Structure formats: structure tokens, C-alpha cells
Image: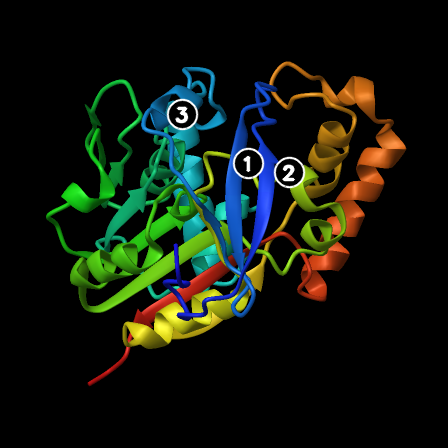
Amino acid sequence: MKECEICQSSEFKAIVAQERMYGTGDIFDYKECSSCKALFLADIPEDLGKYYPSNYYSFGSFNPSNALLALLKKLRYKAFSRGFSFNSPVYYDWLSPLTLTPTSKIADIGCGNGQLLAEMAYSGFKRLDGYDPYIQAAFSSENFSIYKKDFFEIDQKYDLVMFHHSFEHLPNPVEVFTKLVTMLNPEGQILIRVPVTDAKVWKEEHTFWFQLDAPRHLFIPNTKSMEILGERFGLELFNTTFDSMDSQFWGTALYKKGKPLVGTDIGNEFSKKELAEFRNKALQYNKIKIGDQACFYYRKKKQ
């Protein structure tokens, strides 16, 4: 890489990272743009699939709801949409800045086992598609379908395209946005939840940062990078919200201890008091925009 594909800067900082989630210790080279602060994996492994084994977290067990629970979830979302909140799940917060109806056509890129799509279907959404090239098999139900398909193979248009921690798993963010704008209906919206290098924990702990996640994270932006991408493709970035979690602290602490995420019980590593402190600290970091992940909301600019 001679220049940053986001901002065209030719100045980079070299970073050497390890695979830490499974503790393999495999070494990977990253480059950090000195201008927009985006991180890029320098050389993508030919067999990237081996870093997504069957016990990868997004392939976990699918938990269906029975008819009664599904009805209750539908009623709960109706109440939420009218301004009443009853123990709302976190994905309500992700959707609340968006303009959606039950018939909005929605795509979830990197959907894993499809649990989020199922929850949205229980809430009343009727036109839901998920895409993930690493799932074992495609799946279809009454209100949502999951396709074993690469992002660049999608040939449908949507009112909303969502990336819940999948954008960073795709190479060439400019190519992703080039494809993405062709997938949007005239008033289409985009939700991208992604790690960001604005994170204080990245600046302090460097390659021990939990969400560096080499080599699965091929590209990690800064908020500045995401602003540049939106402008470049005629998209209005109408909302940015930090939604980082306590894992930025306990995950990073695990890696500094030399322990992998998979197979380690954090309850044995940290006291209840420490875990509570991590949760409170994450909330504070989000308020002052130094957390390690954020939600970016775009829509097509009106012509």
C-alpha cells in the first residue's frame, strides 16, 4: 500500500500484531494512516476462513422464541415505537435513529447465525435478509432469509443495509462503499457499527487492544475516516453514536496476561467489582467519545 485509500496520504506507521482471540500467536502486519488514522491489514491471508472456526462467537446457538414470547416481543417493540420502553433490548437503541416501517427491506451483512434478524422479525419487521459467507448453510423462514454469500455478490436493493461488526472484516473499504451505494433504494439508509481508532484503549495499549483482532479485522477506521467515506460517496452522515462495551477493558487485560479470549472464563480472571468498574468506565468513555466502537448512520443525500 503506497497511499491510504481513504484520504490518499502516503505516510504510514507500521504495526506488528498477533492473533490473540484463539491464542495462535500468528503474526500480522498492519499499517496506520498518519492522516486519517485508519488501520489496514497489510497482507490478507489466502485462507482467511481458518480464522473463523465453528466456535467463532457469531456462529453460536440460535435461540428461537415460542409463539407467546414472539407476540410479547412484537408488542414490546410497538410500545417502544410509541415512546414507551419496557426493558428494551440493546438493538432498539441501534435502530432508533433510523426511519423504518415494518415493510422496510433490510439487509444484515455478516449476519452470523441470524439471531438479530429473528429478533427483528419477532418485533414485526417482514422483509429481512442476512448475508454471511462463513455460515455452514443458507436458511429461510417466513419473515427472514439467510444467504451463504459474499457481500460483493448481493444483487438486491434495500431501504436499510446494516453492518454489525462486519464492516471491519471486509477488505477495501472504498470498494465496499462503491458497492453499498448501488444497493440503496432512493431514500436508503446505512448503519455501520464498527471498532474505531479514536479509542483511548488503542492509544494506550496498542497491539493488546481487544478489537484489533488480527487478522479478522482487515480495516479499522477512525471517525474521521468514516466522515471522508460518506462525503466521497454522496452520503449524509446524520448521526454518530459511541456504543463501546466493557470488553475493551477486560479483553485487553486478558491479552496482556497472555490469555486467549476463547477458553478463558473472565469470571475467574476478574472480580465482580472489577467487572462492574469496567462497565461503568465504558459508559463514561462513550459519553466523551473515546470508546472503542461507534455506530455510523448514513442516508442518501437528496438530489
Horizontal side, residue 5 vs residue 21: left or right: left
Going 72% across and 66% down the picture, which residue do you hit? 288
Q: Give 8 or 78, whichever is nearer the viewer.
A: 8
Q: Position of residue 44 (x, y in %)?
A: 38, 37
The residue type indicated by label 3 comes to Ser
Q: Is residue 206 visible?
A: yes
Q: Is residue 101 visible?
A: no
User: Which residue in the structure is indicated by mark 2?
Assistant: 210
User: Which residue in the structure is indicated by mark 3?
Assistant: 65
User: Which residue in the structure is indicated by mark 1?
Assistant: 213
Going 35% across and 24% down the picture, which residue do you hit? 49
How crowded pointer 1 is (Cα within 10 Å; few <14, some 14-19, many 20+) is rated as some
Q: Nearer the viewer, mark 3 or mark 2?
A: 2
CB under 8 Å between discs 2 and 1: yes
Location of residue 298 by image quarter? bottom left
Q: Position of residue 218 (x, y in %)?
A: 43, 43
* Label tally: 3
Sequence-earlier tag: 3 or 1: 3
Which quadrant is the C terminus positioned in? Answer: bottom left
The residue type indicated by label 2 comes to Phe
The residue type indicated by label 1 comes to Asp
Q: Position of residue 121 (x, y in %)?
A: 31, 39
Going 39% across and 20% down the picture, which residue do you hit? 50
Q: Give 174 or 18, whichever is nearer the viewer.
A: 18
| 278 vs 141: above or below | below
Q: Secondary structure at mark 2?
A: loop
Residue reaching furthest to the bottom: 303
Q: Position of residue 30 (x, y in %)?
A: 51, 45
Q: Which colour scheme appears in the figure? A: rainbow
Horizontal side, residue 137 vs residue 85: left or right: left
Going 54% across and 70% down the picture, which residue do you hit? 35
How crowded pointer 3 is (Cα within 10 Å; few <14, some 14-19, many 20+) is rated as some
